[in-house]
Image (cartoon, rainbow, N blue to C red):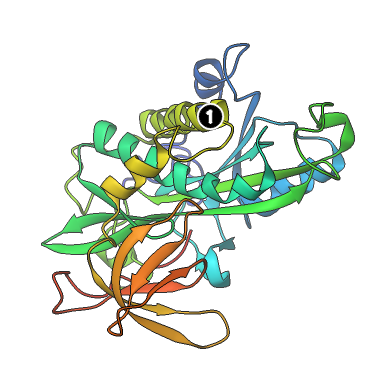
Amino acid sequence: MTPNPSGDPGGRWSDLGRPPLNAAALRRALTGADSVWTSLDVVERTGSTNTDLAARARDGSAREGAVLVAEEQTAGRGRLERGWSAPPRSGLFVSVLLVPPVPQDRWGWVPLLAGVATASALARTAGVDTKLKWPNDVLVDIGGEERKTGGILAERTDVAAAQGRGDGAGGPGGAGIVLGIGLNVSLREAELPVPTAGSLVLAGAPAADRDPLLRAVLRSVEDWYGRWAAADGDPAASGVLEAYAAGCATLGRHVRAELPGGGELVGEAVAVDSDGRLVIGTGEGVQRPVAAGDIVHLRGHGGHGSDDGAEA
């Protein structure tokens, strides 16, 4: 670790290879009249940015388009209540508040479009190949092995009436979505939470500057969210469905779906349907859509093995 000029072993500059984010510059670059992002706050440490932003939405201190970023997240949550934590300033931990102006039965596409946006932003800015594992994991290649470097979690929340659109677009009760994105940026092998996890640096990213990465991810989310909202949430008309299918490493693979309640389904992942569900073709010739579950890419069927990593 690089010596800390401040003398504080736990301070913001305790590891000069992992400098703090520049909140003021990020705010100037990302928020404004022409942006969906209305505010941006960076906190040093928190349990979960999703939990904190949802609380702000409920009490009216955060409005639509709010962005909350943490330098360190100690109790991040992913799908199936898995944890996500990492050393300070080693990743991006960000949540945004959205009130989609589309029918609520299409809101399930928000985490999938965020996956498309995040993967494409990382490919452009970090210079690494990225893929998506259904529904919301971001994979990178490390030594010929797929490893998870990021994850996305969308949670519905109540939004204080004063912060709503006022036209009912947010749905009954002032509903909204807190969208969380967690990315491992500079984690070293010894710091990984599980062997199947990865990071951008381990995948060969030439730089690990989190400021341009965060800008690229948020601008990409804004772009894809805008296309989807302009199409009234239609995944085909907005191009989200086609882009997701093109970047999804799960499709065409032999998989095991571990279903809520303890059941499982084994077969080939053949499609993502218009509701964002993964369609699995079984050995009996039946195609079954899976709306929720943990997907394992099975070995020996054209894949690179299981890639179950920590969740974001």
| Quadrant position of residue 298 | bottom left
| Quadrant position of residue 164 | top right
Relative to 281, say whether 1 is above or below: above
| Quadrant position of residue 60 | top right
Residue at the (28%, 32%) spot, across then down: 125
Q: Badge 1 local density, few (<14 within 10 Å), some, or many (20+)?
A: some
Residue at the (63%, 58%) spot, across then down: 47
**Is residue 18 in sight in this rendering?**
no
Residue at the (88%, 35%) spot, across then down: 161
Q: What residue type is labelled 1?
A: Ala
Q: In this view, does 140 lie to the left or right of 96?
A: left
- Residue behind mark 1: 231
Residue at the (41%, 46%) spot, across then down: 115
Q: Nearer the viewer, residue 49 or 153?
A: 153
Relative to 265, say whether 173 is above or below: above
Residue 171 at x, y = what percent? 78, 41
Q: Which of 215 and 113 is in front in this view?
A: 113
Residue 37 at x, y = what percent? 60, 25
Q: Which of 215 and 100 is in front in this view?
A: 100
Residue 76 at x, y = what percent? 56, 60
**Is residue 99 in sight in this rendering?**
yes
Q: Which of 131 and 266 is in front in this view?
A: 266
Which residue of the protein is positioned furthest toward the top in this rendering? Answer: 33
